[in-house]
Image (cartoon, rainbow, N blue to C red):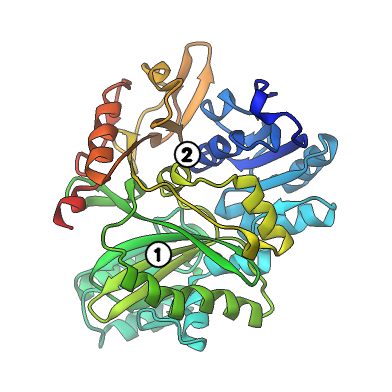
Amino acid sequence: MRLQPDINKKGKSQVKVLIVGSGGREHAIATSVAKSKKVDQIYCAPGNAGIGMIAECVPIGAMEFDKLAAFAREKEIDLTIVGMDDPLVGGLVDVLEKEGLRVFGPRKNAAILEGSKAFSKDLMKKYNIPTAVYETFDSAEEALKYLESAQFPIVLKADGLALGKGVLICQSLEEAKEGVKAIMLDKQFGSAGNRLVIEEFMTGREVSVLSFVDGKTIKTMTSAQDHKRAGDGDTGLNTGGMGTFSPSPFYTEEVDAFCKKYIYQATVDAMAKEGREFKGIIFFGLMLTDKGPRVLEYNARFGDPEAQVVLPRMKNDIIEVMEACIDGKLDQIDLQFEDNAAVCVVLASNGYPVKYEKGFPIHGLERFEGQDSYFCFHAGTKQTDKGIVTSGGRVLGITAKGKDLKEARTNAYKATEWIEFENKYMRHDIGKAIDEA
């Protein structure tokens, strides 16, 4: 769909954008893209009900590469933004580039940074990038033998993509044995568990730092912190994320200086030396240990729900930044963020991430229309004859800004009250760590 004409957009080039994905992250990206003075048409494949309010959603799956390429050619798409991990790791960028299309995101040989935990751990070891001590195993028998002399607690990680859920923290040998069985033998996470990484358990504050990368230059965004467990007090099962806040009060200037010197640029340089030039987003999952910052994980795309608190605070035109990454001109961009804070509380379906019902009408969405400090990012929603209904485990990401984190948190929880649907569930302690800072 065409965006409404804007007198401030006179003289802009008519850029058509295709966003690949269907979650809250892609809605946050689409919201930023819609603000660009360069853009007048947005498509999203497959999108969701919220994205459909600002873009034309097309019924093509994120892994249907040939259909996406044909659509991009037919509609003369100027820029495709790949939001999700699966198509990046699967090589969608390569497919589209072969068609002569401009794409924002890493090629397949660079997306392995997220696609294989064993690869990323080996990369960090080779280039002395601070991370946890680890070992990699291709058989359950070898892994079980190693555990007999290991120290606990210990961390088990499925090597491949597992929707953010392939990590088990085991407190005892018995628990770790069960974990190896679940990952490598029972294939709880599918083929992601064909290889297993076992690493030391690190303690400290977790911080997420997203960055734009053009192959040689890296520009970091404002920090954030995610809450992955389903229940209050970080209890319950691991989920894709139940909420987040930005910036992290624990990400100090001292931490930033250390990470810039030993982690961020070092990672970009390491990928280049390996012949895997990285263009796109590198998400650094960090643990602030008593021995200094360590890399927990890399992602090759915006975090979800981290994007929902980072992008609303970005001052730059997102299209200009992404084009600079593609063209190798990121060093010419002055990346800036608002001097404020944002908090996102995920409204989920009760029972997530295991079993939950769908199809419940959502009420109160109109409260967010015309707001500039409150956002309702759709994650699992669907447009039906009954209106917009729930269609996933994580349904909405309610984000609010404030002058500081405490105000943003208060605003976000106030805004969660605007929305009603049967089976609505949320954590009530998102950002509670703010009080301890």
From this view, report whether residue 40 is shown above or below residue 364.
Answer: below
**Could you tell me which secondary element the residue under label 1 belongs to?**
strand
Q: Which residue is mark 2?
A: 24
Q: Quadrant for the C terminus, please.
A: bottom left
Please tell me which residue is depicted at 45% across the width and 82% down the height of the picture: 129
Can you tell which quarter of the image residue 95 is in?
Answer: bottom right
Q: Is residue 261 visible?
A: yes
From this view, report whether residue 159 is shown above or below residue 212.
Answer: below
Q: Which residue is mark 1?
A: 285
Count neighbours of disc 1 (C-alpha within 10 A) and say few if under 14, some if 14 to 19, many if 20 or more: many
In this view, which residue lies farthest toward the left? 436
**Left or right side of 265 for 368:** left
Please tell me which residue is depicted at 67% across the width and 33% down the height of the picture: 42
In this view, which residue lies farthest toward the top? 385
Can you tell which quarter of the image residue 205 is in?
Answer: bottom left
Locate residue 37, reporting x and y percent.
66, 36
Amino acid type, residue under disc 1 in the picture? Gly
Please tell me which residue is depicted at 40% across the width and 81% down the height of the picture: 130
Disc 2 to disc 1: CB gap under 8 Å = no
**Left or right side of 330 for 118:** left
Amino acid type, residue under disc 2 in the picture? Gly
Locate residue 203, reporting x and y percent.
23, 71
Locate residue 147, reporting x and y percent.
29, 82
From this view, report whether residue 403 is shown above or below residue 111.
Answer: above
**Could you tell me which secondary element the residue under label 2 belongs to?**
helix
From this view, report whether residue 348 is shown above or below residue 129.
Answer: above
